[in-house]
C-alpha cells in the first residue's frame, strides 16, 4: 500500500484545523476561494486525494478515509472540521465513521457516504456518459461530459460563469490525464476499497453536521447530503441559490459565510 509521502497537500494558517476535501476528478485548487478567506483565522489543510491532482496514483488497494486519517495524524491536527464537496463529502463522512477521534464537525455538499444511491435519470445519464468516454480512453469527451455535471439538470454550461467552467475543465483534465481507460480495455482497475454499511452507521456520528446544498444541483446529490444531516443527532441543512454541485465555486462569498458561521458555532 502507498504511504503518506505519495500525497500532496496545502497547509496554511494557524488555529483550529479545517480540512477542505475536493470533488472527484478535481483537486485542491477547487478551494482557491476558500483557502485565503479561512487562513487568517484557521489552519487550513487541503489535500489532493490519491490519484488526483499532484498526489500519486495508487499502487495497491486503499481507502480514501484511511489516507486522510494518516495525513491528519502525520500533521498532528487533533480533531478537525472536515468540509467536503461531492467525493470530498463522502470521504469526510467515511472518516467520521472510521476515525471519529479525528473529526470535530462535518460540512458536506453534493454527496452522503461512499455508498451513493442514484435514482434521478439526469444523474444516471450523466454518469454513464463520462464513465463511458473514460472507459474507451476519450480524454476530451470525458472532461466535457464530467464538466456538464456541474450545471445541474436545469441549466447549460453557458449559464455558468466562464471562469468557473474553465477551472473545472482544467482540474478535470489534469486528474483524468493521470489515468488510463477501464480494466476491460487494458487500463487500470479501481483500487479503492469500500467502506461498508455506511448508511446504517451514519446515525452514530456525534459531531455537528451541516449539509450545504446548491439549489440547482441534482435531486440525488441534495438528498444524500440531506439524509446525513437528518440522520445525526446534531444536523441541519442550508441551501445556496444560483448554484448547483459546486456552490463553493459558483457562490464563494455565500459559501464562505456559511462555513465561517459553522466554525464560529463550534
Image: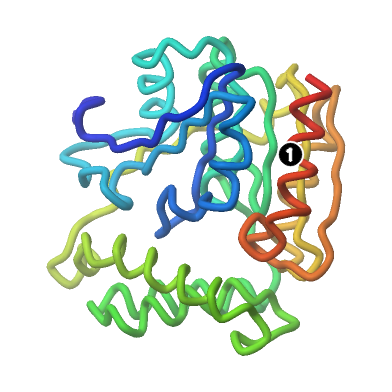
Question: Residue 21: x, y in percent?
Answer: 51, 41
Relative to residue 157, is residue 199 depicted above or below? above
Q: Residue at x 31, y 73 (%)?
A: 134
Q: Is residue 197 visible?
A: no
Which residue is the site of mark 1? 259
Q: Pick the residue in front: 50 or 1.
A: 50
What secondary structure is marked by label 1? helix
* Colour option used: rainbow
**Left or right: where does residue 103 sit relative to residue 194?**
right
Relative to residue 24, is residue 141 depicted above or below? below
**Left or right: where does residue 260 sit relative to residue 112?**
right
The N terminus appears in which quarter of the rendering?
Answer: top left
Q: Pick the residue in front: 122 or 215.
A: 215
Q: Residue at x 53, y 75 (%)?
A: 163
For residue 248, what is the image quadrant?
Answer: bottom right
**Left or right: where does residue 190 sit relative to residue 199?**
left
**Left or right: where does residue 203 sit relative to residue 148?**
right
Question: Residue 179: x, y in percent?
Answer: 22, 61
Question: Residue 116: x, y in percent?
Answer: 59, 51
Q: Residue at x 84, y 65 (%)?
A: 241
For residue 220, what is the image quadrant?
Answer: bottom right
Q: Residues within 10 Å of mark 1 (few under 14, many from 20)?
A: some
The residue lying furthest to the front in this view is 40
Q: Residue at x 44, y 53 (%)?
A: 29
Relative to residue 165, is residue 45 depicted above or below? above
Question: Residue 69: x, y in percent?
Answer: 43, 21
The residue lying furthest to the left in this view is 186
The C terminus appears in which quarter of the rendering?
Answer: top right
Amino acid at each position: 500500500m502507498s504511504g503518506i509521502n505519495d500525497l500532496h497537500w496545502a497547509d496554511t494558517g494557524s488555529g483550529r484545523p479545517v480540512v477542505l476535501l475536493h470533488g472527484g476528478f478535481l483537486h485542491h485548487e477547487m478551494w482557491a476561494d476558500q483557502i485565503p478567506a479561512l487562513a487568517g483565522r484557521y489552519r487550513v489543510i487541503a489535500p489532493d486525494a490519491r490519484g488526483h491532482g499532484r498526489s500519486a496514483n495508487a499502487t495497491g488497494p486503499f481507502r480514501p478515509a484511511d489516507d486522510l486519517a494518516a495525513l491528519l495524524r502525520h500533521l498532528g491536527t487533533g480533531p478537525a472540521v472536515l468540509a467536503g464537496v461531492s467525493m470530498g463529502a463522502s470521504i469526510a463522512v467515511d472518516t467520521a465513521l472510521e476515525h471519529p477521534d479525528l473529526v470535530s464537525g462535518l460540512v458536506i455538499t453534493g454527496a452522503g457516504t461512499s455508498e451513493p444511491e442514484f435514482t434521478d435519470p439526469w444523474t444516471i445519464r450523466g454518469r454513464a456518459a463520462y464513465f463511458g468516454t473514460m472507459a474507451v480512453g476519450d480524454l476530451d469527451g470525458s472532461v466535457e461530459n464530467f464538466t456538464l455535471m456541474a450545471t445541474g439538470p436545469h441549466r447549460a454550461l453557458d449559464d455558468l460563469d466562464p471562469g468557473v467552467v474553465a477551472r473545472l475543465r482544467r482540474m478535470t483534465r489534469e486528474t483524468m490525464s493521470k489515468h488510463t481507460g477501464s480494466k476491460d480495455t487494458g487500463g487500470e482497475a479501481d483500487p479503492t476499497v469500500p467502506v461498508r454499511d455506511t448508511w446504517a452507521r451514519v446515525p452514530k456520528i456525534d459531531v455537528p453536521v451541516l449539509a450545504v446544498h446548491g439549489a440547482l444541483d441534482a435531486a440525488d446529490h441534495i438528498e444524500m447530503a440531506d439524509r446525513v444531516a437528518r440522520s445525526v443527532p446534531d444536523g441541519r441543512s442550508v441551501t445556496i441559490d444560483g448554484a448547483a454541485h459546486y456552490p463553493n465555486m459558483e457562490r464563494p462569498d455565500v459559501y464562505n459565510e456559511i462555513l465561517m458561521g459553522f466554525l464560529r458555532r463550534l
